[in-house]
Structure formats: C-alpha cells, structure tokens
Image: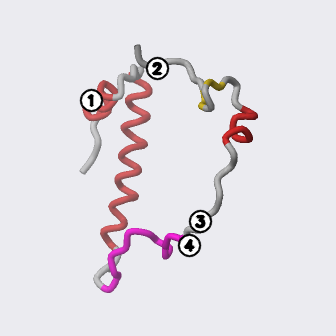
Amino acid sequence: MSITVKDVRHVAKLARLELSPEEESVFTEQLNAILQYAEKLNELDTDEVEPTTHVLHVSNVMREDAVRDSLPVEEVLLNAPDEEDGQFKVPAVLE
C-alpha cells in the first residue's frame, strides 16, 4: 500500500489544511516512508507472543477509604474570591 498525492490532498482537506504543491510532495514521500517502515513489522514472527494492551504491567494502586471529618465551611471559604450564604459564588453560566 502506498500513499498518493491525491490521498495527501484528501487528508489535508479533512484537516482543513492548505498545502503547497511542495508540501504535498514532501508529505507523500514521508508518509510512504512511514508505511514502508511499518511493513517491516509484518516480517516478525509473533505466533508465540501473547496479546497485550500495554507493554508494561499496569495496575491501579488503590488505598482504603478512611472516614474523617471534613473541613469547616468557614475555613474552606477563606480563600474563595466571593461567597454567599456559605457557598462559593461564581458567575452565572446559564441564563
């Protein structure tokens, strides 16, 4: 499979990019070089390789929930730029 100038123009149109003819030519060559390099992966014997979602082992590190008292409202609102009736006051987003 190879990329043509027509393909590059189509992708540029989808991305709303204006490319000069020189840029189209350069991108066509670069994308074809990338595809040729990726084709080398087909030469690898992967029959004995187990499918993975990550290269490294990934696991979530969770801590136990601990019940504790919250901060007092007065202390929380100390750094608030504006407060009203014990709540943060923010600009209206909806009418």
Which numbered circle lies on residue 93?
Answer: 2
Secondary structure found at label 4: loop
Between circles 1 and 2, the one closer to the viewer is 2
**Disc 4: which residue:** 64
Between circles 2 and 3, the one closer to the viewer is 3
**Magenta residues, dominant SS class:** loop
- The quadrant in which residue 49 appears is bottom left
Q: Nearer the viewer, residue 32 or 58?
A: 58
* Vertical arrangement, residue 68 with respect to residue 7, above or below: below
Tell me, yes or no, whether the two marked residues, 2 and 3, touch with CB atoms within 8 Å.
Answer: no
Quick one: label 1 or label 2, which is nearer the N terminus?
Answer: 1
Q: Amino acid at mark 1?
A: His
Which numbered circle lies on residue 67?
Answer: 3
Quick one: label 2 or label 4, which is nearer the N terminus?
Answer: 4
Which numbered circle lies on residue 10?
Answer: 1
- What are the residue bounds of the magenta stretch? 48-63
Secondary structure found at label 2: loop
Which residue occupies 41% across, 20% down? 20
